[in-house]
Amino acid sequence: MPINRRNIQPDALHQRRVDGRLLYSHVVSVEPRQLIFVSGQLARDREGRIVGAGDMRAQLRQTLENLKSALEAAGASLSDLVRTNTYVTDIDAYFKHTDIRMEYYSHAMPTSTTVEVRRLAQPELMVEIDAIAALG
């Protein structure tokens, strides 16, 4: 059974667009039966090795693949995302790769926050994403 979900873009708030597409929703309203909380995902492969040291694009892709795998393990998908928090060590480098973000999030357009931080769990890590998904 699908959830009752509405993506809301209040007229009073700026709507950030990249290549003419909305980058995120300011508000997502859901009436779920199940919420899924995903802890911060990093650019690590299955064996725990860091993927793409020094390469924001590679790390972002691996982190999103890990997020996708975590959601699938809970019976959800990226289209069920309603909220993400992204922590990056270089926000300018991160925003050079919005195409990757849109590749993964375009169907969900979750609410999101991106924050530049001094450091993540290991110095080589450049991006971490935690998330909330909702299932009907």
Image (cartoon, grey):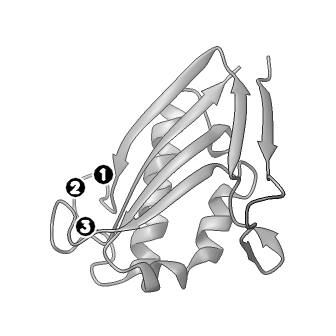
Reading the image, the residue beneath label 1 is 46
State the CA–CA distance, disc 1 to disc 3: 10 Å
Q: Residue at x 71, y 71 (%)?
A: 16
| Secondary structure under the numbered disc 1 in the rendered image | loop
Q: Give the vertical position of 130 relative to 12 (above or below).
A: above
Q: Position of residue 94 (x, y in %)?
A: 47, 78
Q: Residue at x 17, y 59 (%)?
A: 121
Q: Position of residue 32 (x, y in %)?
A: 67, 20
Q: Give the vertical position of 34 relative to 51 (above or below).
A: above
Given residues 27 and 128, the one toward you in this image is: 27
Labels 1 and 2 touching (C-beta < 8 A): yes
Q: Position of residue 36 (x, y in %)?
A: 50, 28
Q: Amino acid type of disc 1?
A: Arg
Q: In which quadrant of the rendered image does the N terminus lie?
A: top right
Q: Amino acid type of disc 2?
A: Gly
Given residues 122 and 83, the one toward you in this image is: 83
Q: Amino acid type of disc 3?
A: Ile
Given residues 54 and 89, the one toward you in this image is: 89
Q: Residue furthest left?
A: 122
Reading the image, the residue beneath label 2 is 48
| Secondary structure under the numbered disc 2 in the rendered image | loop
Reading the image, the residue beneath label 3 is 50
Q: Residue at x 71, y 53 (%)?
A: 25
Q: Give the vertical position of 58 relative to 128 (above or below).
A: below
Question: In the picture provided, is 57 more to the left or to the right than 47?
Answer: right
Question: In the picture provided, is 87 more to the left or to the right than 65?
Answer: left
Instruction: Give the crowd class for mark 3: few <14, some 14-19, many >=20 residues within 10 Å.
Output: some
State the CA–CA distance, disc 1 to disc 2: 5 Å
